[in-house]
Structures are given as structure tokens and as C-alpha cells.
Image (cartoon, rainbow, N blue to C red):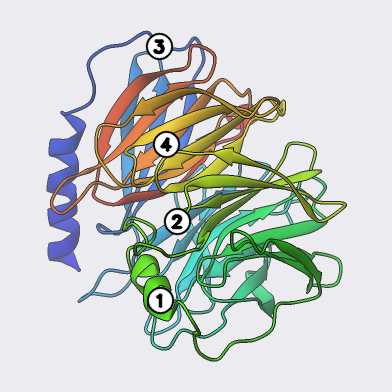
Amino acid sequence: MILRVAVALCAIATLTARAAPHRPTPPREYQAYVASEAADVISVIRFGPPGLTLTRTLPTGLMPADIDGPHGVAMSPDGRTYFVSLAHGQPAGAVWKYAVATDAVLGQVTLGMFPATMQVTPDGEFLYVVNFNLHGDRVPSSVSVVAVDRLLEVARIPTCLMPHGSRINPQGTRHYSACMMDDTLVEIDTSTLKVSRHFTLTPGAETGHQGPPASAASLQGDEVAHTRHAAGHGSDPPAPGTNMCSPTWAQPSADGRHIFVACNASSDIVEIDSEKWTVLRHIPAAPGVYNLAVTRDGRLLVASNRRGQSVSIIEIASGKELVRLPTTRSVVHGIAVTGDDRYAFVTVEGVGSEPGTVEVIDLVALKTVGTLDVPPQAGGVDVLPLERH
């Protein structure tokens, strides 16, 4: 453990010196938290005068001989605490709770296999975490619901194979996740803590259904193609001739009326009417669209393109891609939009011995305005609410 932390700190010192050249800076300050899965490090980043800077790093995890794998980061609505999912447990993973003011660990809770993306409900009471489960046989996994004050798992809801992209509608009434191996979108009713509906996303067979998806103990049909694609977390292209969506993210619109689903394999975004539970349209996307975020004014959809080494800014009303911005490195991952809709923080994992990268995009000027190296495999990211700065 000591050696691993020392190596990580040496790498951080080198990375800090490699920040991007000076660019125009915003008049106010923004703060983001980034998880580096390959280094067991949380980076705290500030963007404002004098630019984009790495202010501090926090080692995380307990395993002395292996990587704990911090994957997701979720900020509480009041900005006082944040949560980090540690995916590589023995075998179960965990979520740790941190204090923003002191960086102190406030507690932890053991969840399912490979806890990944997560979000806190708008009232700040519950945390919804998808258990992605990369281990062993391909069997249906689950979504964990955690009471944040007591750090108690109050429910573990069975869903489908490899749930990812955990997001809650603005009203706090519905939770959505996308199951990469099942070509399925799953909706959970937060009042009953049960699956209320699911949606089949396979191209040509898109259909809305009531209730949970049927359980599947093993894969059928496209088993080899699904397994190969999922093994790379959406970085590898699907096998030729494979007809699949392979959804990696479910993002409610700013008003909760629509759900945008990133189809990583078919490289498009499916928009679903959340009331009628039908497809509204397909929005063309760049290769390997992966994670999504929307601006609070409902105007823009931001998409990370995992195989395309780029970020797309899409005008929601027209479905038009306004700009596609190349990233410094490959394997683009997470997105977090600031509370004023002005900037998007995007993480890039990098490959092999490369560091990770955080890139800041100006959503008004539609250009990248800051780039900063961080420890390897930068993934989960969230931003501190503006009122907490």
C-alpha cells in the first residue's frame, strides 16, 4: 500500500507540471472531483483564475496488494459530502462517503459486484448505485439503494446484465439504468423500490414493456458478440454483422419527460418518451457514444465518444451536432456539467502507461478551454454545486 501511494504521488507531481498552456479563464471558480481507477486516487480540480489546476489528491481504498478501482463519483445536492464507488472488491465492492470540507472519510458500505456509476436523489436522502458485475458468469445484476445518512443499503433491486449509467429524473420519482448485455433500459419506481418498466433497445425490435425484464441465467444468440463488446467497456467495436444497441448510459431530460440512451455499439442515441414509453427519435452519434449529460436549461446534450476520441455537443431541439471536439487522448469516459450550464468537465482514461486527462469545454463558445493530466484511467467525475464554493 505504501509503495503504491508513493508511486501515485510521484506520478501526480509529474502530471501537474504537464497542464495545458494558458487559456482565457472564467471569472468565477468551479471545483470538480475525478476518480482514477488504475491509481486508487481522487483528484480535486479547480477551474478559474489562474486556470485549470490540480489542487490536491486523495488516496482511496484498502487493498494492499491490488487496485480497489474507484469508478464513480457522486456529489450530494447540498455540496457537503460526496461518494466514491470502489469497484474491485473481494468480491463485493463498496461506496465510501467523504466530507467536502475536510476530505475525511465519513463511512463506507459494502454493496454488490463492481459498484459503478451512481447518483444521489434530489432530496439528498438516497444514493442509487448500479452493480455492473464483471465477475464470473453473465447473470442478471442489480441496483443498490443506500440511505446516505446512515450509509445503509436499504434495497438491492434485481435488474439485468451489466447495468450502467445510473441516473434519476429531476422529480426524484424514477431511476434509470442501461444494461449493456441485455440491450435494455430499466426504470425503477423510487416510491416502491421496484422495477416498474423496461424497454428493449435492440435495433428493429425496440419495444416498451411493463414490469421487470425476464431473468436470464445465461446468454443466448449473440453471446460471443455481446461478451467481446462488453469486455472492453465499449472501447472495442462490435463484431461485424452484430445487431445490438449495447446501451451504456441512460440520461433523463431536464424536465424528465424524455430519456436519452447512448447506444455504444450502433453509435446512436435513442430518445424515449417517458410517459408514452415509446421511441421518439434516433439521434446520430459519433463512434462508441458512451456517457451523456444534459444542461439544466434543456438545450444541450453532451456525449462522450469512447471510440471516437471526441466529445459531441448536440442541440436537443433539432438533434443537430453543433460541434465535435477531439480529445487529447483516447478512451473518453465521464461528463459533468456545471450548475450554471456554462462548462462541461470531461474525463479521458488514456491507454497503457498514459496519464488520464480532464478537459473543460465551454458550452457557450463550443470549444475546449482547459486540459489537465491526472493519474491514469480517469473515469467518474462530478462538480461541486456553485453555492458551495
Q: Left or right of 226: which side holds 110? A: right
**First reached walking from the N terminus: tag 3 or tag 2:** 3
Along the viewing direction, whichever of 35 and 50 lies nearer the viewer: 35
Dot 3: few (<14), some (14–19), or many (≥20) neighbours within 10 Å? some
Dot 1: few (<14), some (14–19), or many (≥20) neighbours within 10 Å? some
Q: Which residue is mark 4?
A: 346
Residue 371 rendering spot, x and y as whole percentages: 30, 27
Give how far apart the Cα atoms at labels 4 and 2 are.
21 Å
Can residue 148 be seen here? no
Task: Give the residue drawn at x 68%, y 61%.
Answer: 206
Q: Which mark is residue 265?
A: 2
Can residue 115 be seen here? yes
**First reached walking from the N terminus: tag 1 or tag 2:** 1
- Residue type, label 1: Leu
Q: Which residue is mark 3?
A: 25
Dot 4: few (<14), some (14–19), or many (≥20) neighbours within 10 Å? many
Q: Which mark is residue 134?
A: 1
Residue 255 rendering spot, x and y as whole percentages: 80, 38
